[in-house]
Image (spheres, rainbow, N blue to C red):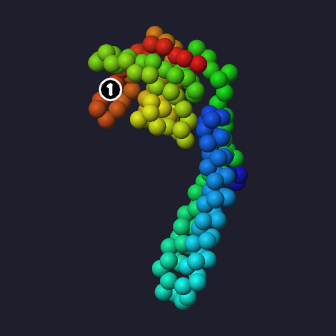
Amino acid sequence: MMAIETRFKMSAERKKELEDELFYLQTVREKEVAEQIKEARSFGDLSENSEYDEAKTEQGKLYSKIAEIKNLIENAEIISKSDVTDKVGLGNKVTVKDVDFGIIETYHIVGSQEADPGAGKISDDSPFGKAILDHKAGEIVEFEAPAGTLRFEIIKIDK
């Protein structure tokens, strides 16, 4: 049986951020942690050395983070602006109007790795993201939320 390969949709900018973070972790941070371990070893008996245990735990977390970022980079699916049509899709900025309250907001539709609702970046996997995908300006979409059924009119789609 073959493993199912997971692709992570993201912008080229997000992939570059991950590559920069990976470089930092593999160079600067890895040296810092190795130095902590070396210093803790110098304190003597490792069986009762809490500094050594903490440094080794930190090293484990670091290696786990490095592996996670490598996986994201290796399985990145870059969403380019040319993939954008007149329908809502990844990479679009979408202006919507809450039909019930008249509130107008703009969201950037991104892959789940880039989602940051507070910054207006909504994942295509979120209930709202799924609801507006593949719809055109002028259409009204509905989706279920904990607060009940929400209805939005898509006002404008920016590429």
- Residue in the picture at 46% in, 25% down: 107
Judging depth in this view, the residue of 134 and 137 nearest the camera is: 137
Whether residue 42 is visible, yes or no, is yes
**Residue at the limit of the structure toward the top, as seen here:** 138
Whether residue 72 is visible, yes or no, is no
Amino acid carrying mark 1 in the image: Thr
Pointer 1 residue: 149
Q: Position of residue 126 (x, y in %)?
A: 46, 35
- Residue in the picture at 48% in, 86% down: 48
Judging depth in this view, the residue of 38 and 147 nearest the camera is: 38
Q: Quadrant of residue 32?
A: bottom right
What number of labels is visible? Answer: 1
Q: Position of residue 13 (x, y in %)?
A: 63, 35
- Residue in the picture at 29% in, 29% down: 148
Disc 1, SS: strand
Q: Position of residue 5 (x, y in %)?
A: 66, 46
Q: Quadrant of residue 67?
A: bottom right
User: Are there few (<14), some (14-19), or many (20+) residues within 10 Å of tag 1?
Assistant: few
Q: Position of residue 31 (x, y in %)?
A: 64, 65
Residue 55 lies left or right of residue 34; in this view the side is left
Q: Is residue 17 above or below residue 79?
A: below
Q: Quadrant of residue 29?
A: bottom right
Q: Is residue 47 above or below residue 15?
A: below
Residue 20 lies left or right of residue 134; in this view the side is right
- Residue in the picture at 64% in, 53% down: 24
Q: Is residue 39 above or below residue 138?
A: below
Q: Quadrant of the C terminus?
A: top right
Q: Quadrant of the N terminus?
A: bottom right
